[in-house]
Image (spheres, rainbow, N blue to C red):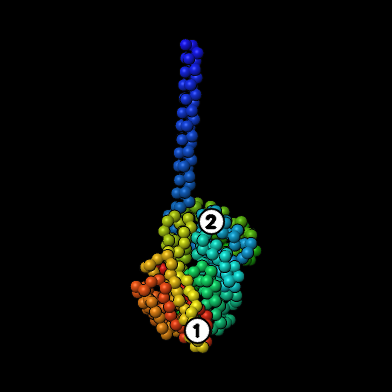
Amino acid sequence: MIERKRRSALATALLSGLLATCLAVTVTSAVASASAAQRHTAAADCSAGYVALTFDDGPNPGNTANLLNALTSNGLRATMFNIGQNAQNNPSLVRAQRDAGMWIGNHSWSHPHLTQLGSSQVASELQRTQQAIQQATGSAPRLFRPPYGETNGTVRSVAQQLGLTEVLWDVDSQDWNGASTAQIVQAASRLQNGQVILMHDQYATTLAAIPQIAANLRSRNLCAGMISPTTGRAVAPDDGGDPTTPPPGDSCTATITPGQQWNDRFNLSVTVSGSNSWIVTVTLTPPQRVIATWNGTPSWDSSGYVMTMRPNGNGNTFGFTIQHGGNWNWPSVSCRTG
């Protein structure tokens, strides 16, 4: 009898200890979960508005991947103004930018002084970059930053014809001019709602500044947003969800493929994936013009160089014939849902 009581008491003690342990684990887990939720909420507090982090001159092997890792691990999104040659030589890095939730802009083909070039040369610089990024990601940029920030009426006119919004900056980090990490962080701390900061893809000092820039923005209830193609200012991301979390990707993608070609003209087709309710913008380079279309309903802007195509019940592939006028470059193509 005494032995049975002793065993019963021991069993009761063990059970009590186990219950206490389980309760402690449950409470600890709940506290940890609450703490994580609080941190997440604090990171997503955008009550003071949005700023745009921009990085020029990529993508670069050995640099871009580290930059993307630093941005995503600190809950930041940015606009990457890519050089066309770099994009063509490193298409997987352009796709990595997109897949990390970054926005991609046009920074010319070879980074020349555009204001010293004629209209056709400027058009070539921008159009070739549109094509390289389009071919890498499935969609063409809507934002353009002129190299060195140099622009004039010719540059702006060509950009507008290509459906591009010119974006300069409010704050220069001076990373290109040898600024230290501390100086880059200090520059970013001056950002206010709607403003844009200039940084670059290739500098170790800029990479090291990312965690401190993220911390400073959080302390001021600012979030890293997108650049509006309408105003050129920083705004909330338009893809929904937590602005610190990259989106799963574009809601629709337009892929362009070649068809027949003749001496004076050529055919192209565009296939849309991701949505049956799509609007595709096709931007030509003068003196090109579209002389025929099929399997879609087109409309045109006042310049005659921007065609907007919508479905007409014949599926998600449409085509058109371009009379090239000596310019064999493919038009840029972008897709949005409507």
Q: Can residue 119 be seen in this view?
A: no
Residues tagged 1 and 2 counted as in contact (Cβ below 8 A): no
Q: Is residue 68 left or right of residue 304?
A: right
Secondary structure of residue under mark 2? helix
Q: Is residue 177 left or right of residue 95?
A: right
Q: Residue 261 carries which label?
A: 1
Give the residue furthest to the left: 313
| Depth order, front residue of 236/219 | 236
Percent position (x, y) of residue 100?
A: 52, 59
Between marks 1 and 2, how big is the CA–CA gap? Answer: 44 Å
The residue depicted at 41 percent of the width and 58 percent of the height is 240
The residue depicted at 48 percent of the width and 36 percent of the height is 28
Looking at the image, residue 90 lies above or below residue 295: above
The residue depicted at 47 percent of the width and 65 percent of the height is 227
The residue depicted at 50 percent of the width and 51 percent of the height is 219
Please name the amino acid that badge 1 sits on: Gln
Give the residue furthest to the top: 1
Looking at the image, residue 91 lies above or below residue 32: below
Q: Can residue 238 be seen in this view?
A: yes
Looking at the image, residue 66 lies above or below residue 134: above
Q: Residue 17 carries which label?
A: none
Q: How many marks?
A: 2
Q: Which mark is residue 72?
A: 2
Percent position (x, y) of residue 34?
A: 45, 42
| Depth order, front residue of 148/250 | 250
Work out which quarter of the rendered image holds the C terminus and state it.
bottom left
| Depth order, front residue of 189/331 | 331
Secondary structure of residue under mark 1? strand
Please name the amino acid that badge 2 sits on: Thr
Please tell me which of labels 1 and 2 falls first in the chain: 2
